[in-house]
Amino acid sequence: MATSTITQITLDAFRDDIQSRAMPGCGAVAANAAANGLALVLKGLRLTQSNDDDGTAQRLIAQAQRLLEQLGDYADEDIAAFKAYLAAKKRNDKSDSEAELEEAVERINQVPLDTARCCLEALEYTEQAIGDIKAALQSDARAGAQLIHAGLSMVLINVDTNIDGLEDEAERRQLADQRASLQAEADRLLERLLRARS
Protein backbone atom coordinates (compact mmCIF):
# COMPACT_ATOMS: atom_id res chain seq x y z
CA MET A 1 0.00 0.00 0.00
CA ALA A 2 1.11 3.53 -0.63
CA THR A 3 2.22 5.52 2.41
CA SER A 4 -0.17 8.31 1.40
CA THR A 5 -3.49 6.96 0.18
CA ILE A 6 -6.80 8.50 -0.79
CA THR A 7 -8.56 5.75 1.18
CA GLN A 8 -7.42 7.50 4.37
CA ILE A 9 -8.97 10.90 3.65
CA THR A 10 -12.55 11.95 4.32
CA LEU A 11 -15.19 11.98 1.60
CA ASP A 12 -15.39 15.77 1.89
CA ALA A 13 -11.63 16.09 1.38
CA PHE A 14 -11.70 13.67 -1.54
CA ARG A 15 -14.50 15.60 -3.27
CA ASP A 16 -12.68 18.87 -2.62
CA ASP A 17 -9.51 17.48 -4.20
CA ILE A 18 -11.47 16.23 -7.22
CA GLN A 19 -13.02 19.62 -7.94
CA SER A 20 -10.06 21.81 -7.10
CA ARG A 21 -6.89 19.92 -8.13
CA ALA A 22 -5.48 18.26 -11.23
CA MET A 23 -5.43 14.96 -9.36
CA PRO A 24 -7.28 12.78 -8.39
CA GLY A 25 -8.76 12.39 -11.83
CA CYS A 26 -11.09 10.02 -13.62
CA GLY A 27 -9.09 6.85 -12.93
CA ALA A 28 -8.84 7.36 -9.17
CA VAL A 29 -12.51 8.33 -8.92
CA ALA A 30 -13.46 5.28 -10.99
CA ALA A 31 -11.50 2.91 -8.74
CA ASN A 32 -13.07 4.51 -5.68
CA ALA A 33 -16.57 4.16 -7.16
CA ALA A 34 -15.99 0.48 -7.89
CA ALA A 35 -14.70 -0.04 -4.34
CA ASN A 36 -17.86 1.56 -2.95
CA GLY A 37 -19.94 -0.77 -5.10
CA LEU A 38 -18.01 -3.79 -3.88
CA ALA A 39 -18.52 -2.60 -0.30
CA LEU A 40 -22.30 -2.85 -0.87
CA VAL A 41 -21.86 -6.46 -1.98
CA LEU A 42 -19.63 -7.16 1.01
CA LYS A 43 -22.24 -5.67 3.33
CA GLY A 44 -24.77 -8.15 2.00
CA LEU A 45 -22.43 -11.04 2.73
CA ARG A 46 -21.54 -9.86 6.21
CA LEU A 47 -25.16 -9.31 7.23
CA THR A 48 -26.22 -12.66 5.76
CA GLN A 49 -23.47 -14.68 7.40
CA SER A 50 -24.78 -17.15 9.99
CA ASN A 51 -23.11 -18.79 12.98
CA ASP A 52 -23.32 -22.25 11.37
CA ASP A 53 -21.60 -21.14 8.16
CA ASP A 54 -19.23 -23.79 6.78
CA GLY A 55 -16.57 -21.19 5.98
CA THR A 56 -17.86 -20.26 2.52
CA ALA A 57 -18.97 -16.79 3.62
CA GLN A 58 -15.64 -16.15 5.36
CA ARG A 59 -13.74 -17.08 2.20
CA LEU A 60 -15.95 -14.81 0.11
CA ILE A 61 -15.52 -11.96 2.60
CA ALA A 62 -11.73 -12.39 2.56
CA GLN A 63 -11.75 -12.35 -1.25
CA ALA A 64 -13.79 -9.13 -1.27
CA GLN A 65 -11.42 -7.50 1.22
CA ARG A 66 -8.49 -8.32 -1.07
CA LEU A 67 -10.27 -6.77 -4.05
CA LEU A 68 -11.16 -3.67 -2.02
CA GLU A 69 -7.48 -3.19 -1.15
CA GLN A 70 -6.48 -3.63 -4.78
CA LEU A 71 -8.98 -1.04 -5.94
CA GLY A 72 -7.66 1.39 -3.33
CA ASP A 73 -4.13 0.71 -4.56
CA TYR A 74 -5.18 1.38 -8.16
CA ALA A 75 -6.71 4.70 -7.15
CA ASP A 76 -3.38 5.71 -5.63
CA GLU A 77 -1.42 4.26 -8.56
CA ASP A 78 -3.49 6.29 -11.04
CA ILE A 79 -2.51 9.49 -9.24
CA ALA A 80 1.14 8.46 -8.98
CA ALA A 81 1.33 7.40 -12.63
CA PHE A 82 -0.11 10.68 -13.91
CA LYS A 83 2.20 12.73 -11.68
CA ALA A 84 5.19 10.72 -12.95
CA TYR A 85 4.05 11.30 -16.54
CA LEU A 86 3.80 15.07 -16.03
CA ALA A 87 7.25 15.14 -14.41
CA ALA A 88 8.79 13.04 -17.20
CA LYS A 89 7.16 15.21 -19.87
CA LYS A 90 8.54 18.35 -18.24
CA ARG A 91 12.06 16.88 -18.06
CA ASN A 92 11.84 15.61 -21.65
CA ASP A 93 10.84 19.05 -22.89
CA LYS A 94 14.08 20.39 -21.40
CA SER A 95 16.53 17.58 -22.24
CA ASP A 96 15.03 15.63 -25.16
CA SER A 97 15.57 12.39 -23.23
CA GLU A 98 12.67 10.17 -24.29
CA ALA A 99 13.31 6.92 -22.37
CA GLU A 100 11.76 8.16 -19.12
CA LEU A 101 8.80 9.66 -20.95
CA GLU A 102 8.16 6.42 -22.86
CA GLU A 103 8.16 4.50 -19.59
CA ALA A 104 5.74 7.01 -18.05
CA VAL A 105 3.43 6.78 -21.08
CA GLU A 106 3.45 2.99 -20.85
CA ARG A 107 2.52 3.27 -17.18
CA ILE A 108 -0.43 5.62 -17.75
CA ASN A 109 -1.64 3.27 -20.49
CA GLN A 110 -1.35 0.21 -18.26
CA VAL A 111 -2.88 1.48 -15.00
CA PRO A 112 -6.40 2.08 -16.40
CA LEU A 113 -6.39 -1.37 -18.00
CA ASP A 114 -5.27 -2.98 -14.75
CA THR A 115 -7.94 -1.04 -12.85
CA ALA A 116 -10.59 -2.17 -15.33
CA ARG A 117 -9.45 -5.79 -14.95
CA CYS A 118 -9.77 -5.47 -11.19
CA CYS A 119 -13.29 -4.06 -11.62
CA LEU A 120 -14.11 -6.99 -13.89
CA GLU A 121 -12.84 -9.38 -11.24
CA ALA A 122 -15.09 -7.60 -8.72
CA LEU A 123 -18.08 -8.12 -11.02
CA GLU A 124 -17.20 -11.80 -11.43
CA TYR A 125 -16.91 -12.03 -7.67
CA THR A 126 -20.34 -10.42 -7.25
CA GLU A 127 -21.90 -12.96 -9.59
CA GLN A 128 -20.30 -15.73 -7.52
CA ALA A 129 -21.31 -14.24 -4.15
CA ILE A 130 -24.82 -12.96 -4.83
CA GLY A 131 -26.44 -16.36 -4.29
CA ASP A 132 -25.14 -16.34 -0.70
CA ILE A 133 -26.77 -12.99 0.08
CA LYS A 134 -30.24 -13.01 1.59
CA ALA A 135 -33.13 -11.67 -0.46
CA ALA A 136 -33.58 -8.51 1.63
CA LEU A 137 -30.02 -7.41 0.73
CA GLN A 138 -30.03 -8.42 -2.93
CA SER A 139 -30.90 -4.88 -3.98
CA ASP A 140 -27.74 -3.60 -2.30
CA ALA A 141 -25.67 -6.23 -4.10
CA ARG A 142 -27.19 -5.39 -7.49
CA ALA A 143 -26.75 -1.67 -6.88
CA GLY A 144 -23.15 -2.45 -5.95
CA ALA A 145 -22.71 -4.36 -9.21
CA GLN A 146 -23.95 -1.34 -11.16
CA LEU A 147 -21.47 0.90 -9.35
CA ILE A 148 -18.60 -1.51 -10.05
CA HIS A 149 -19.64 -1.58 -13.71
CA ALA A 150 -19.78 2.23 -13.74
CA GLY A 151 -16.26 2.38 -12.30
CA LEU A 152 -15.00 0.06 -15.03
CA SER A 153 -16.72 2.08 -17.75
CA MET A 154 -15.34 5.31 -16.29
CA VAL A 155 -11.74 4.13 -16.21
CA LEU A 156 -12.02 2.91 -19.80
CA ILE A 157 -12.65 6.53 -20.81
CA ASN A 158 -9.01 7.08 -19.82
CA VAL A 159 -8.05 4.24 -22.17
CA ASP A 160 -9.93 5.99 -24.98
CA THR A 161 -7.92 9.14 -24.34
CA ASN A 162 -4.67 7.14 -24.29
CA ILE A 163 -5.57 5.46 -27.61
CA ASP A 164 -6.08 8.88 -29.19
CA GLY A 165 -2.59 9.90 -28.03
CA LEU A 166 -0.75 6.92 -29.56
CA GLU A 167 0.96 7.32 -32.92
CA ASP A 168 1.75 3.63 -33.52
CA GLU A 169 -1.24 2.03 -35.27
CA ALA A 170 -0.49 -1.47 -33.96
CA GLU A 171 -0.41 -0.16 -30.38
CA ARG A 172 -3.65 1.72 -30.97
CA ARG A 173 -5.38 -1.44 -32.24
CA GLN A 174 -4.03 -3.56 -29.38
CA LEU A 175 -5.21 -1.08 -26.74
CA ALA A 176 -8.58 -0.67 -28.46
CA ASP A 177 -9.08 -4.45 -28.59
CA GLN A 178 -8.29 -4.83 -24.88
CA ARG A 179 -10.62 -1.96 -24.05
CA ALA A 180 -13.49 -3.41 -26.11
CA SER A 181 -13.06 -6.87 -24.59
CA LEU A 182 -13.15 -5.56 -21.03
CA GLN A 183 -16.26 -3.46 -21.66
CA ALA A 184 -18.09 -6.27 -23.44
CA GLU A 185 -17.42 -8.79 -20.68
CA ALA A 186 -18.45 -6.29 -17.99
CA ASP A 187 -21.68 -5.55 -19.88
CA ARG A 188 -22.48 -9.28 -20.09
CA LEU A 189 -21.81 -9.79 -16.39
CA LEU A 190 -23.94 -6.84 -15.33
CA GLU A 191 -26.82 -7.99 -17.53
CA ARG A 192 -26.72 -11.45 -15.94
CA LEU A 193 -26.56 -10.00 -12.43
CA LEU A 194 -29.50 -7.70 -12.97
CA ARG A 195 -31.53 -10.45 -14.61
CA ALA A 196 -30.88 -13.02 -11.87
CA ARG A 197 -33.23 -13.28 -8.93
CA SER A 198 -32.75 -15.15 -5.68
Image: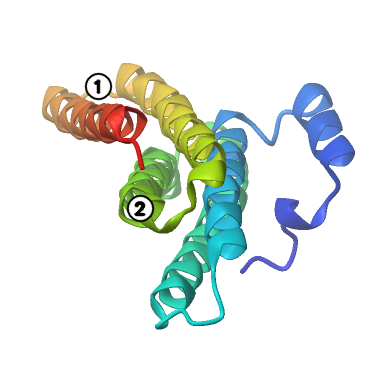
Residue 1 in percent (x, y) is at 61, 69
Which residue is located at x 30 percent, y 28 percent?
195
89, above or below 77, in the image = above
Residue closest to the eye, 114 or 129: 129
Residue 91 visible in the picture: no
Dot label at residue 167: 1
- Horizontal placement of 72 versus 181: left or right? right
Task: Give the total of numbered labels.
Answer: 2
- Horizontal placement of 81 versus 102: left or right? right
Which residue is located at x 34 percent, y 51 percent?
121
The earlier-in-sequence mark between 2 and 1 is 2
Amino acid type at mark 1:
Glu
Please tell me whether mark 2 sits on a helix, a strand or a loop. Answer: helix
Q: Which residue is mark 2?
A: 131
Residue 181 in percent (x, y) is at 18, 32
Query: Is the residue marked by circle 1 packed among few (<14), some (14-19), or many (20+) residues within 10 Å?
Result: few
Q: CA distance from mark 2 to mark 1?
A: 46 Å
115, above or below 142, in the image = below
Using the rendered view, name the quadrant where residue 188 is placed: top left
Residue 124 in percent (x, y) is at 30, 49
Which residue is located at x 86 percent, y 47 percent?
10
Residue closest to the eye, 20 or 155: 155
Please tell me whether mark 1 sits on a helix, a strand or a loop. Answer: loop
Residue closest to the eye, 175 or 84: 175
Which residue is located at x 22 percent, y 34 percent?
185
Amino acid type at mark 2:
Gly
Query: Is the residue marked by circle 2 packed among few (<14), some (14-19), or many (20+) residues within 10 Å?
Result: some
- Horizontal placement of 182 versus 160: left or right? left
Dot label at residue 54: none
Residue closest to the eye, 88 or 70: 70
